[in-house]
Amino acid sequence: MLKNKVFLITGGARGIGLSIYKYAINAGAMVVICSRNIDEVNKAILEVDPTGKNSLGLKVDVSIIMEVKGLVAKTLKKFGKIDVLVNNAGIYGPIGLLETNNIDEWQQTVNINLMGTVNCCQAVLPIMKKNGLGKIINLAGAGVGGSKPLARFTAYFASKMAVVGFTEALAKEVEGEDIQINCISPGGVNTYFTQWLLNNGEEKAGSDMYNQALKQKENGGDSPELAAKMAMFLASTKSNHITGKLISAKWDLIESMSDKNILKNSLYNLRRIDNNFFYEK
Ligand code: NAD
């Protein structure tokens, strides 16, 4: 079903993005991955697609519009189209009380997590509209949609909330085109993110988050394959009825999402936990 589809996966060189890259290649897709570090990009291609026939790796910072434009142009030159955009590149940003955060690092978190996603969507949407179809998958996380705001991770939490809000609004904007835009929350996956949190220490991260990360590191955490499998589902035509949703790779079952009524309730929206739309009151 995904054979010969062209994927563009930002930050696809390690962690969750790497797992999505592997699944896409195994499904017969052609994949462009990028990150700010060309060595990790080349290493990933060597691991996943050693001949490099179906892959292209580029050094790109998604927070820089000109670099994103170059990424999209080079993808079109190599593969001629973009069917699936996965906005996976992201950082935790500064950890600790707001007044101790470096404000440039705070801003950079928004620039990468939110604006990186916005930049890629803006560059890719005209291509998808011209092709008459497309899938955009944004990585959420930070427990947004849950009942626990992440104190001491304000840049990360705010930027991921914004990514989900952006996804909901953009999905509405392209309603009528055959383009679906959704978010995945991948669960707690042991990646560089976990190490970054632990490196920051308990005093900055707070004991709840620190101990949770420590426990997650010890017990192995959630598999990145949960997010990769959900991404394959959301990239396929099987999910054409799903758009503007926040989907948990850990808690939501792919089988239960074939129900076409899924768009009618708020279960899969940002306000899913209290199930209470403000405009329905
Ligand atoms: P990771 O650090 O292993 O991978 C992130 C990738 O993004 C890396 O390849 C990195 O080089 C790249 N990247 C970072 N900034 C970039 C930039 N400006 N331009 C281009 N590439 C950039 O982390 P991960 O855990 O695999 O995270 C992937 C996504 O999943 C992130 O958006 C993260 O917020 C989200 N997420 C992760 C978890 C988790 O438990 N690991 C939980 C929720 C959400």
Image (tube, rainbow, N blue to C red):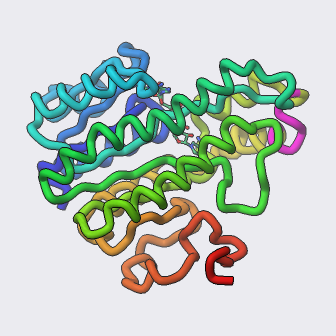
Residue 47 coordinates in the image, percent (x, y): 31, 28
Indicate the quadrant where residue 109 lies: top right
Say whether residue 109 is left or right of residue 72: right
Overall secondary structure of the magenta section: helix
Give the image quarter of residue 71: top left
Which quarter of the figure is the N terminus placed in?
A: bottom left
Name the image quarter holding the C terminus. bottom right
Q: On screen, 137 above or below 195?
A: below
Q: Residue at x 32, y 21 (%)?
A: 66
126 part of magenta stretch: no
Q: Which residue is drawn at 40% across and 19% down?
A: 40
State which region is magenta: 204-210
Whether residue 29 is visible to the viewer of this picture, yes or no, is: no
Drawn side of residue 137 relative to residue 276, left or right: left
Please say whether residue 192 is visible from this viewpoint: yes
- Number of numbered markers: 0
Q: Residue at x 60, y 45 (%)?
A: 160
Q: Nearer the viewer, residue 54 or 86?
A: 86
Q: Position of residue 256 (x, y in %)?
A: 45, 79
Task: Give the camera-side residue of 43 and 274.
Answer: 274
Check the image and report above or below for 153 versus 59.
below
In the rendered image, which quarter is residue 52 located in? Answer: top left
113 or 233, which is in the foreground? 113
The picture places residue 97, in percent across and down from the top left corner, at 86, 31
Residue 152 shown left or right of residue 266 in the figure: right
270 up-or-down from 218: above or below:
below
Image position, residue 37 (x, y; %): 42, 16
Q: Which residue is drawn at 43% across and 59% down?
A: 182
Residue in front for this viewpoint, 107 or 85 = 107
